[in-house]
Amino acid sequence: MYTIVKHAHLTIIALTFIFFLINFVLTIKGSDKVNNKLLKIGPHILYTLFVITFIYLMIVNPLNLYPFVNGWASSKLAGFVFYVLSIAFALKWAKKTIWRVLGFISAVFWLAMTARLGFADHLKVKGAGDETNAAIGAFVDQSFEVANNIAQSLLPTIC
């Protein structure tokens, strides 16, 4: 069950970014399609599903990585918050194109940094034994493989 939810979590992240790209392009163009009901409601549904899967993954994770207890999980949570704030800045708060582009760059930056943190191969838990740290390494390797598969399947669709 954990693996299924983890894959759903990664898919939701990819979908939120795709929705953001679509909304950003339509906003920059000044299109009325940005008011499409699906484009308005879709991201909120995805963020809700993201938070639900995040909570599930934190509760049942095999590595005992919890936000506010472990720096890695706290950094991932903070990265998500800054990612969402950057999206809100790019799509809602900024009124000039230059600020919207800056918000877009910021959102891509936070998504990339949070993803990079997720695949950190140097992740070690203080006070944990070699067995736990080896399990973390295996977990990171599996996550990298999943993200690679998602990227390979999305690339032809985007291009």
Image (cartoon, rainbow, N blue to C red):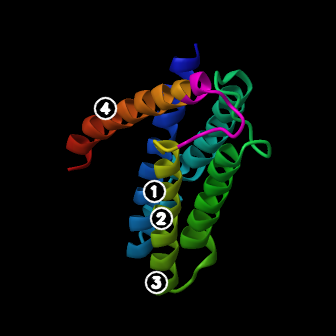
Query: Mark 1 belongs to which amino acid?
Result: Ala
Name above or below for residue 78 compared with residue 54: below
User: Which residue is disc 3 drawn over?
Assistant: 97
**Discs 1, 2 touching: Cβ within 8 Å:** yes
Query: Mark 3 belongs to which amino acid?
Result: Thr
Count of numbered circles on the image? 4
Q: Which mark is residue 149?
A: 4
Q: Is 4 positioned to the left or the right of 52 in the image?
A: left
User: Which residue is disc 1 drawn over?
Assistant: 112
Query: Mark 4 belongs to which amino acid?
Result: Asn
- What is the magenta segment's predominant secondary structure? loop
Please report whichever mark, 2 or 4, sits nearer to the chain's N-terminal start.
2
Measure how far apart labels 4 and 3 are at the Cα level.
34 Å
Query: Mark 2 belongs to which amino acid?
Result: Phe
Boundaries of the magenta span = 123-133
User: Which residue is disc 2 drawn over?
Assistant: 109
Name above or below for residue 106 compared with residue 110: below
**Percent coordinates x, y for residue 50 in the rendering:** 62, 38
Q: Secondary structure at mark 4?
A: helix
